[in-house]
Each structure stands twice: as C-alpha cells, then as structure tokens.
Image: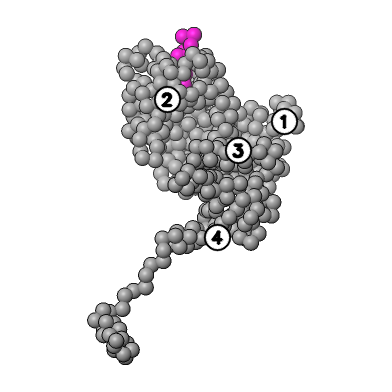
Amino acid sequence: MAPPQSIVHSDAMAAADHPAQPALEPPAEDAYRLLVDSVIDYAIFMLDPTGRVISWNAGAERIKGYSAEDIIGKHFSTFYPPEDLDARKPWYELEVAAEVGRFEDEGWRLRKDGSRFWANVIITALFEKSGRLRGFAKVTRDMTERMRAEEALRASEERFRLLVQGVIDYAIFMLDPTGRVISWNAGAERIKGYSAEEIVGEHFSTFYPPEDLVARKPWRELEVAAEVGRFEDEGWRLRKDGSRFWANVIITALTDAAGRLRGFAKVTRDMTEHRRVERTLTEQRRLVGHLVEAQELERRRIAWDVHDDSIQSMVAVGMRLQLLANRLPEQDAAVVRQLDEAVRASIGRLRNLVFRLRPPELDRHSLAQALDHYLTDLAGPRGMTYRLRHALDQEPPVESAITIFRICQEALVNVRKHARASAVEVSLTSVDGGTLVEVADNGIGVGAHVDTDAGVPADRPATDHFGMIEMRERAETAGGWWSVGRGPDGGTAVRFWIPDSPGGEP
C-alpha cells in the first residue's frame, strides 16, 4: 500500500492537470426561491390546503404590510374585508381553484393597517404527481391606481356623454366611416325631428336636399374631412317632416392611435333664424346706405346751388352796394354800407351752411382740413380749445371720408350741446386697412350726454338717443364699428373704425 505522501502527491498532480472549475450554480429550487423573494411588484406566496400562509415574499410584505413573521401560519382570509368574509369568499375561491386548477378575481383587499387596495388575484392549485392537493400559489397585484384611473376615465366619459346628450341647441352625433349614424343626442332630435330609434343606422345623406344628393355632396364632405381632418359648411338641410332649415355643419374625422379612420363627429346648428336676421340687417343697411348716399348727393346739390346761385348773387349785390355807397352823400352812404354789412354777414352764414352741407375740402381729398375747419367754427366762439391729431398713411376714399366727417360732426355736436367740456381732441389713425377715429372731451362723462331737447330721460343710456344711434348706424353701414365710453380725461370718448373699402374688406 502506497504511503500517504504518494496519495497527496497524486492529488496535487491531478489538480495541476485539471484547472479549477467555477463554483456550481445553486439548485433550480433555490434559484426559483431567490427569484420569487426578490419580486417587489407582486405579492407571491403559498398557502397550505386549508388556506394558511406558508411562504411570503418581499412584494407581499410591501403590498400588504405584513412581515413574514407577522403572517406565516395565519389564514389568508385575513386579507379580505368583512363583507367578503360574510359571503365566505376566501373559502369559495380555494374551492374553485382546487376544482378547476385556477381562480382569478379583482376586488378590495386589506393591508395590515386596515386600509383597502384594489387587487388582481390569481390562485393556482398545486398538486403532487399522485394528484393529492399540496396547497395553493397566490399572486396578488395592487391595481388601485389603475382602477382609479379607469374609474376617472369612466366618470369622464359619462360626464361627456351626459354633456353631449343634454345639449339641445346643437345636433351632435357620430357617423361610422361609411357615413351611417351611430349616436344621436337630444339636440339632433330637436333640430332634425328624428328619434334615435328612427335614425341610428341610417346614412346621414338623409338630411340633404335632392340637389345636394345629385351633386354627391354628403360623400364629398366625408372625403374632405377624412383627407384634411375637418370640413365646415353652411347650407340647406332637411328635417324629418321635409321642411328645410339653414345649417352650419362641422364634420371632424376621428382616427385611432394607428391613424385608422374610426368615423366622424358631426355638429349641426340651426342657423335659420340667424340667417333671416342677418339678411334683414343686411337689407336694412343696404337701404340705409342708399339713403345716406342720396342724402349726401342732395346735400352736395343744395350746397352747390347755394354757392353758385345765392352766394354769387349776394356777392354781386354787395359789390354794387359798395359802388353805390361811394357815389351817395355821406348820410345816405351810411345806410347803404349797413346794408352791405348785412349782405356780407348773410354771405358768411350761407358759406358756413354750405360747409356743413358739404365741406369742399372733402372733394379735394383733405379730411383733416375739413375737420380742422369744422373744429375752428365749433370751438372758437365758445372758448373751447381743440386739438386735431392725424397719422394717416393715405387719404381715405371720398365715401369713407364723408362717413368719418359726419360721425365726427355728430359727436362734436353732442360735445357742444351736452358735455360742458372745455377741451376736445380728435385723432385719426390708419389701422387695419381703414381709419380709426377718436373724439374725446373732458366734460361730464358718458351717461350724462342725453338729448334733453328730444326729451330723453336722464337715466337712459347715452347710446340710446338718436344721435348715438345715427353714428353707430353710419359706421356699421360702412362696414366698420362704433363705441362710446370713458375718455382719458374723465369725459366721453367716441371711437369708431371705417374701412377704406366697402364692406370692411382691406
């Protein structure tokens, strides 16, 4: 028998011939246990056949709040709220899992501190090869945040549904990709006359008059909406009883996250009354425009007639009176000179009348000069100071200039009659293809300018009396706007804008 040294030597030689091997992997069972214990997003634990806890991972401790020492040996019914215990739900779940091999559920569960969380639970029965039940594997996930998000989404969808269903001034409904109605709100029923039962499933071309069907308009609208995302139109539509109404229609294409067309949202508003009122106002403004135009033509004709006939004749009379005065004795000449002065005064008044009827500066394209002339005539005798500021890129067209002058004229008359102002400022500025004008005084303020001559009550808003209405009508007829409010110095400021082209188009 070889001595022990030889054995040791043989082992050393063997080690030299064979390099050291890496450490062996832990057994599969240990690896599985390590994996389960390290999971923290799921509670993974085992129950014995009676439902008592026999293992506990880190996820179970994090989700449920119990340590392994706290819970192992306890019955898993500890995690269930009282109403589930009364219904014997834990035991029922084990029975089902034992019978069919698996049980899945979502519901409220309890943490150690008594707080509830919404859990997704899967219980799997574990059997030996012989078929004997060894226990259960239980996986629990805390779904509280997801459940709350889903509830919030459901509540939001319900609120939106109630909102849409409750709207009665708009027809709001959905179409499938082919154009068939798939939803219907109360507004759609009120405007179009169909109940949901009558119209859901029908093609929306039902609402279009024959001439639109011949032109394939409904299908073309869907094509445009699908292509660019949205389509808007105004036109005639049909009610259930066959009557027509003027509709504003917006069709919006609805696509999913992948970009696939899921259908269309359609919003329709009955604009029949609005259109009627708008057409009436348009016709009224057209008539007012004709009236104003005729009035200006008549003013110009009268002004020219007075200037060419009356004033020229009176000037000739004055010249003859002056010649006569030079030939008469002094005592008679004095009387003739008095007559000459009276004629001159009359000529002055007539020229002022001519200016008010039709300022000649307007025909010479000088709005600022016309206003300056008028302000001088208005403010001078009354001791009121005035300032005219203008920053015009170009002279407004004659029609616009006349409108601006007339509104300023009316505003300045109101200042003279009602404002008790010591100063007034007029500004003209080129803005947005038109002229922005402000007439501001330092008088008693808006609301106090009432036309006492016309008997307007003192508590009536200033914008109600005829002069204010006339200013606003003139501005709106020209395609502009008009407003009145407090001025920078505490008085009243009339502001308006008149476009350089008819209808407000730059």
Which mark sits nearer the N-terminus, 1 or 3? 3
Q: CA distance from mark 4 to mark 1?
A: 80 Å
Where residue 248 is drawn, which disc sits there? none
Residue drawn at x 64%, y 61% as measured from the top left: 69
Q: Which residue is mark 3?
A: 92
Q: CA distance from mark 2 to mark 3?
A: 46 Å
Q: Is residue 452 visible?
A: no
Residue drawn at x 42%, y 25% as measured from the top left: 175
Rendered location of residue 153, percent (x, y): 54, 39
Q: Look at label 4 and name its amino acid.
A: Ala
Mark 2 vs 4: CB contact within 8 A? no
User: Circle 1 — which element?
Assistant: loop
Q: Look at label 3 and name its amino acid.
A: Tyr
Question: Is residue 247 part of the magenta span, yes or no?
Answer: yes
Coloration of the structure image: one colour
Tag in front: 2 or 4: 4
Q: Which residue is mark 1?
A: 460
Q: Look at label 2 and name its amino acid.
A: Leu
Which mark sits nearer the N-terminus, 4 or 3? 4
Image vertical order of residue 35 relative to residue 487, above or below: below
Rendered location of residue 400, percent (x, y): 46, 34
Q: Which residue is mark 2?
A: 175
Tag in front: 4 or 1: 4
Which mark sits nearer the N-terminus, 4 or 1? 4
Between residues 210 and 370, which one lies in front from this camera angle? 210
